[in-house]
Image (spheres, grey):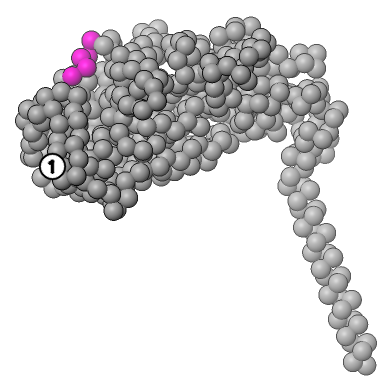
Amino acid sequence: MKTINKRIFLLVSVTVIFAAVAALLMFSMFSHAEEYALKSINSHLYDNGVLMNAGDIKDVNGTVLAQTVDGERVYSDDSDIRKAMLHIIGDNEGFISGGIQDTFREELCSYSLIFGVNKDSKNTLNLTLDSDLCAEAYNQLGSYKGCVGICNYKTGEIVCIATSPSYDMYNKPDDINDSDKYEGVYINRLFGGLYTPGSVFKIVTALGAINNIDDIFSQTFYCDGSYTTDDGEIICNDVHGTLTFEQALNYSCNSAFAQIAIQLGAEKLNEAFVQAGLDKKYSSIDRFTSKGGVFSAASTASSSDVGWAGIGQSTTLVNPYSYLNFMCAIANGGKSYLPYFVKSAEGENGREVYTAVPVDSGVSISPTTASSLKEMLRTTVSNYYGDYMFGDVTMCGKTGTAERDDGNPHAWFAGFSYDDSFPYAIITVVEDSGSGLKYAGTVAAHMMQSLYDKTVNK
């Protein structure tokens, strides 16, 4: 009897396990049916890795950037737009990692659980990007490597992305894999780049100072062209004399900010770096993952190392997308939505296939601190760069000239519109160029005025 009971128990156990596995497999098949149906192994749907029945991709103005015609994937007639949008849309060969033709292929195709993939019906993917603005930014970068990103700081919608170098997929250069001109050509530098920040990092140091030094706004700092610590010397870009905290940011004084950084110490500087979200690898709702930044000064760092870190001239590395998000948070009162560029997908019958839901970026700055930083960045433009540079746009911002041992400096500009009826933030990096104001600042000024003309002066 015991033997029979054991066999019955074993049989029931095996049956239950089999039923559970079968149910799990069925659930997986149904919940991932669209993903399985659109895998590249299904050769009747693909031609050389390109999904033949993919729908249209349109920019914010309804301009078609990619579509399928007679079973062939075709792109914009404008070569500048093709080059500017390459790293967003992706290419036909799969070299561009994270292109939305791949990451949003399920939304681009008309699929139903009952009928499978409908090759006669296509969906449309709508972007927040203005392709003309992207092409203009790409051309502004000229022969320099670098990137531009412009985002609505109230909504998180990115209206402009440009990354250089790029290429025209209809006329791919023969030397693309050999020439230094195309180094890193397959990388979207806005999301995948890591750079020494230079003086834009002083905004992070200022954040730490406001949070931790009670009398920071009443302190003064003296600059005679350098600041000597107990173990080294920080060189300044000028002789500034006596400066307040706000003036130190306005005039980008290395001596003053080295002193502030040393007051804070490496641990508090790192806390500000983390609070700004610069350490994060952001997994965007656009289905890419950005690079996480690296803060270099350890708790055991020497005074001069902390001083150099506080002015952005150490081995600290920052990702431009993360810094754009930081700018959005300051402009938006201390919080931001994670910047994104895929807005929606819809079927031919108007059926909603996908709608972006803005996500809190996790950056949290007190409204008072955000307001103080905003006002300091405003006077940096009005007192130092000059409002004339930005035309009709009342700007807040900071430049960075990131000195390097192996070439010309990387130029940075990070900032945003002071007027929240024109709520846009911008990040610009121009590699191996020179002065942050001359190179990145000029690109930023041009692009913000161009966007203003499109949205306000139209």
Name the quadrant containing residue 376: top left
Position of residue 222 in the picture relative to residue 103 (left or right):
left
Segment colored magenta: 384-388
Q: Residue furthest bottom?
A: 1
Would residue 347 be found to the left or right of residue 328 on screen? Answer: right
Residue 385 is covered by the magenta coloring: yes
State the image coordinates of residue 7 (x, y, percent, origin top left).
Answer: 91, 82
Q: Quadrant of residue 21?
A: bottom right
Q: Residue at x 84, y 65 (%)?
A: 18
**Main SS category, magenta section:** helix
- 109 left or right of 228? right
Q: Nearer the viewer, residue 97 or 328?
A: 97
Which residue corresponds to the image point at 51% horizontal and 32% vertical from the top-left?
192
Residue at figure coordinates x 30%, y 18% from the top left: 435
Q: Position of residue 438 (x, y in %)?
A: 30, 14
Please name whichever residue, 142 or 175, is drawn nearer the observer in this view of the structure: 175
Where's the N terminus, which quadrant? bottom right
Instruction: Indicate whether residue 225 is drawn in magenta.
Output: no
Q: Identify the residue at horizontal 8%, vertical 40% (top origin).
A: 219
Q: Amino acid at mark 1?
A: Ile
Asked which quadrant contains residue 453, the reply is top left
- Residue 229 spot, x, y in % from top left: 16, 42
Q: Is residue 49 visible?
A: yes
Q: Secondary structure at mark 1?
A: loop
Residue topped by disc 1:
216
